[in-house]
Amino acid sequence: MEIDSLNRQIQKKKEKLQKLERDKKIYMSNESREKRRKRARNLIMLGALFEIENLHRENASSLLGFLHENKELFIKYKEKYFEIGESIFQNRKESKNNLTNEIGKNEIKELLQLSNIFKIKNQDLGVFIQERFKKKLFEELTIKEFHIIKNYILEK
């Protein structure tokens, strides 16, 4: 009996060890997946920087050569480049915010003038705004939407 009891204990310990090994593999897999996800996100962000500076269509070898040749310069003036980068990010953020801000009195006046052009062209500005932007009031339009309307009617 004692041997049977010991065999059962050994079997339970083996099963527990197998479970721990499976758990370890899962943990390592999740950790590896998280590292890959972070790396992919970082690479996407770096690619976006090249797009911001309109370099995303340049030859990869040329870009790598440029970065290689200027690495020491970058390291030497890293703080200066940081400030320049922060300024660019801030300007882009402000520009984006300006495009999403609601229009003001001047834009509404211009929209009223544009509505006459719509009428001349047998179109209805109100219908256009409702269909395109799902909005009913001029005041709800953003600056970006205002420019879309303006470009639409002036191009036709």
Image (tube, helix red, strand yellow):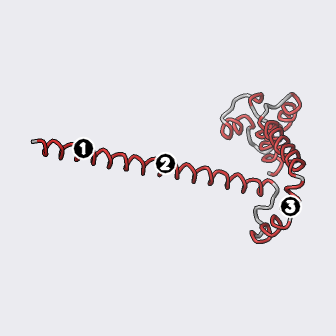
Q: Residue drawn 86% across and 51% down?
A: 78
Q: Residue furthest front?
A: 2
Q: Could you tell which of marks 2 and 3 lies nearer the N-terminus? A: 2
Q: Residue at x 85, y 55 (%)?
A: 75
Q: Label 2 to label 1, Cα distance in Å?
A: 27 Å
Residue 11 shown left or right of residue 64 in the figure: left
Dot 3 corresponds to which residue? 72
- Residue 77: x percent and y percent? 90, 53
Viewer-proximal residue among 50 and 68: 68
Q: How far apart are the alpha carbons under marks 3 and 1?
A: 60 Å
The quarter of the image holding the N terminus is top left
Residue 30, numbered circle: 2
Task: Give SS at disc 1.
Answer: helix
Q: Residue 69 appears in which quarter of the rendering?
A: bottom right
Q: Sequence order check: which comes first, mark 3 or mark 1? A: 1
> As shown in the figure, which amino acid type bears the numbered disc 2?
Asn
In primary-sequence order, the first of circles 2 and 1 is 1
Q: Is residue 6 left or right of residue 123?
A: left
The kind of secondary structure element at disc 2 is: helix
Residue position marked by numbered label 1 in the rendering: 12
Q: Residue 110, percent across and down?
A: 87, 35
Along the line of sight, the residue nearer the viewer: 122 or 148? 148
Q: Residue at x 76, y 39 (%)?
A: 145
Q: Nearer the viewer, residue 5 or 134?
A: 5
Q: Amino acid at mark 1?
A: Lys
- Residue 102 sits above or below residue 67 on the image: above
Q: Residues within 10 Å of mark 3 (few under 14, many from 20)?
A: few
- Frontmost of labels 2 and 3 is 3
